[in-house]
Amino acid sequence: MKRPPRRWLLWGALLLLVLALLGVLVFLAAKYEEVRDQEALERDATTLASDIRGGLVRNVQTLQSLHSVAPTTGSWQDPAADLLAQHRELVRLEWRDGTLKTLAARDSAYVSELYGQLPRSQALPDVRQACESAHRVSGPSFSPSYFWPMSNGMGMELMEMCLPVVRTGEPEGFLVATYALPGLLAELTNKDLVRGRGLAFTEVDGTRLALHSSVAGSRSLQIATTLLDLPGHTLMLRLEGPRRVAGLFPNVLTAVVGALSLALLAVLVLLGRDMRRRQRAETEVADALAFRKAMENSLVTGLRARDMQGRVTYVNPAFCQMVGFDADELIGTGLPAPWWPPELVDEYQQRQAVRLAGQILPREGYESVFQRKDGTRFPVLIIEAPLIDAQGTQTGFMSAIIDQSEQRRVEELNRASQERLQATARLATVGEMASLLSHELNQPLAAIASYATGSLNLLRDGAGLDTPELLRQAMQRVSEQADRAGRVIKSVADFVRRREQVREAVAPTRLLDAIMPLVSLQAKKLDIRVQTRVAPGCPDVLCDRTMVEQVLLNLARNGMQAMPEGDPPLASGLRVLSLVIAPRRAPQDEGEAPRKTWVEFAVTDHGRGLSDEVREKLFTPFFTTKAEGMGLGLSLCRTVIEQHGGALTFEPAQPRGTVFRFTLPAISSAP
């Protein structure tokens, strides 16, 4: 069985503790309110007992004044009746002599036939007990209460109070006052304290003697009892009160505690939900950080973060591998950086000061040279962007560093491959022109042979007056023909020879002169007229002479091959190949600074032109329309021109044919 996660166990334990705490709080609040209500009930019971005691004391004073008002038994009846009318708790007043013989008596008008069921003599023992006690203490004394049945089938709890009567220092008997216990509860207590409560006199064992009021319903009760100490007798007063609120919330404090408890539970629920969301967000952030970390670790591009003072705050493994330092060695380092070459520290310091001052636009790449920990140097490309925090404040710079060592090596390999392809193309061109070279060389060799034979004949026939002059002319012709053959061979050798690319200032006419012997050979064979024109004042160009000569020769040969033998000539009856060289300046707006000057080379043929399909694939490597071609000529030509910063284009010629144009930077504007 799968065990629940530890986190859920902790949450369950926390919830149980909170519930237990809330239960204890509610219980304690309820008990506190209950105790407070009980104390209030007991205080009210004590107050009621004090009220009854105070009322009895006042009654004693009133009864004592009765005999001063009515000294004789004849005059005693009316004041006694008035006193009974004013004090309903009294049901009978009696004036007895020293032997307890009744001298005068008066019953309350509010109780009828009190002694109709039993004679008054039945209560004489209680009267005697009270009077004996009063005689001993020379003051009022009460007898124990007793139940007195009445004629209506009911009964009443009565209590005798005996008060010695003294006049001019002489005893004149006793004044006996009979109290009804229900009357004491009804007449001598505070009505406001009794309202809604139960009030009664009880025995010690809880037996109820007299009841004034009771609590309606069957709700739970709170009971308070107090002793009513009277001279000669003690009564127990019982006060019953209902609980204010039954159920979970007995009062306001308990309700407040309960409400706070529920609020605490709600807060815990919300806190748990918030923690779940936070944990989910933290998990997502951790996954995102792990993903970003894995992505950064897999990058071959070095990443470096710096603060606004230039101190390194972050590097990724690619950057550490690039410079040969560990991350701990780089974090916190400032300027000068440990990967800067010592001789370039001042230059790099100035550059970084400018960048940190914000004078260089962000995300601008620039090249630099770094030094590894072992001292080796390598070229890099640095691209920087500002680091912006969540408040939109820039806190530093993030740099992406690209090691260009491999790129430079690949570029060098490509350059070497292009040179080999160009040499191969030149060799192929020489192979195609071998027959033309043999035909062209036959003429000067035949002429040399003829002049040599003539010279030998002159020497054999003997000397004449004009023999030296004829020999000199023959030797001069032999030298001219040998020089002619040498120029043809040299032009081919220079074209084929491989050498390092060196850009130099070259006059356009020298480029034409270098290729014209080879162009003329093929033009003579194909019966094509070659026209050349160089604009006056055309500036020199900065180029690699051999490579540009190859471009010119390749375009001229392609133009002548586009006009095969039997192709319809122009209106003039000739097949013409034009080579035009002229300067060209880029257009500029008024007030704008002068722009770069270029020299444009145009090779125009008047062949059949190019189809749409051929135009789309014209510069594609290994695409050719010739049966014996390799398809590398025009692709190499465009690569060479673009390496010089120019462009190779083509367009239809008029009335027919194609014009190939390429541009080279003039020496006056070349960097």
Image: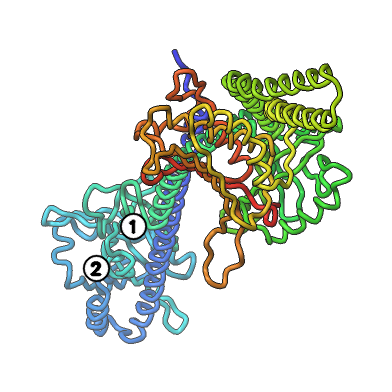
Q: Is residue 324 left or right of residue 609?
A: right
Structural crowding at the residue carrying mark 2, measured as other residues with C-alpha within 10 Å and reported as few (<14), some (14–19) or many (≥20): many
Position of residue 136 measured from the top left corner of the image (x, y, whole percent): 48, 64
Note whether residue 292 is visible. Answer: yes
Identify residue type, mark 1.
Answer: Asp
For label 2, the residue is 91
> Which picture quadrant has residue 330?
top right
> Which quadrant is the N terminus positioned in?
top left
Secondary structure state at the residue bearing disc 1: helix
Q: Is 427 in front, or is 331?
A: 427
Position of residue 62 measured from the top left corner of the image (x, y, whole percent): 36, 79
> Which picture quadrant has residue 375?
top right
Q: Residue at x 38, y 41 (%)?
A: 570
For label 1, the residue is 126
Q: How has the structure been colored for display? A: rainbow
Position of residue 608 measured from the top left corner of the image (x, y, whole percent): 37, 34
Q: Is 373 in front, or is 83?
A: 373
Identify residue type, mark 2.
Answer: Val
Q: In the image, which is nearer the foreground, mark 2 or mark 1? A: 2
Q: Earlier in the sequence, mark 2 or mark 1?
A: 2
Q: Residue at x 22, y 57 (%)?
A: 156
Secondary structure state at the residue bearing disc 2: strand
Q: Residue at x 33, y 57 (%)?
A: 126
Find the distance from the CA under tag 2 to the CA under tag 1: 16 Å
Structural crowding at the residue carrying mark 1, measured as other residues with C-alpha within 10 Å and reported as few (<14), some (14–19) or many (≥20): some
